[in-house]
Image (tube, rainbow, N blue to C red):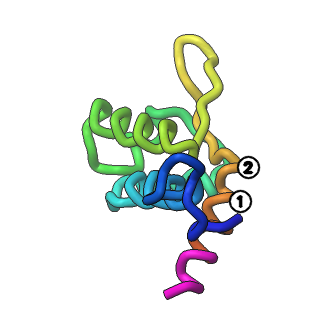
Amino acid sequence: MNIRKPVRGNDHYTEESIQVARFCKALGHPARITIILMLLEKDSCMCGDIVKEIPLAQSTVSQHLKELKEAGIIQGNISPPKIKYCINKKNWHLLQQVLKQFLDMI
């Protein structure tokens, strides 16, 4: 993994630097950090379970879950009519790697 080497045809950003930015943007709200910590502790839970723990409206929690899911940090398994959320283990490992590499550079 090399966050310094630019993507072919793009002199400014590498795939890894784009991924670091995507992860950091998703981590940029305390509610999302709290959600991640809950999922790491409980392995998985439904949106309603998260709403019970975090003093936010269900629609707000859903928006935070959407941001985390779009960044690839979490994933949702559909069990109609609900979605069970959990950490995306593969991307969590990647997140740890790219952030470590990035922080080791500065």
* Amino acid type, callout 1: His
Label 2's element? helix
Q: Which mark is residue 90?
A: 2
Q: From the viewer's side, name the closer residue of 105 and 51.
A: 105
Residue 11 is at least partly visible in this image: yes
Question: 10 Å neighbourhood of mark 1: few (<14), some, or many (≥20)?
Answer: few
By secondary structure, the bulk of the magenta-drawn segment is best described as helix
Q: Position of residue 11 (x, y in %)?
A: 47, 57
Q: Is residue 65 left or right of residue 99?
A: left
Q: From the viewer's side, name the closer residue of 16 and 89.
A: 16
* Amino acid type, callout 2: Lys
Q: What residue appears at the point 63 percent right and 47 percent down from the top-left corner?
A: 87
Q: Position of residue 30 (x, y in %)?
A: 34, 61
Which quadrant would residue 34 be assigned to in this image? bottom left
Position above or below: 2 against 10: below
Q: From the viewer's side, name the closer residue of 1 and 96.
A: 1
Residues in magenta, as a range: 101-106
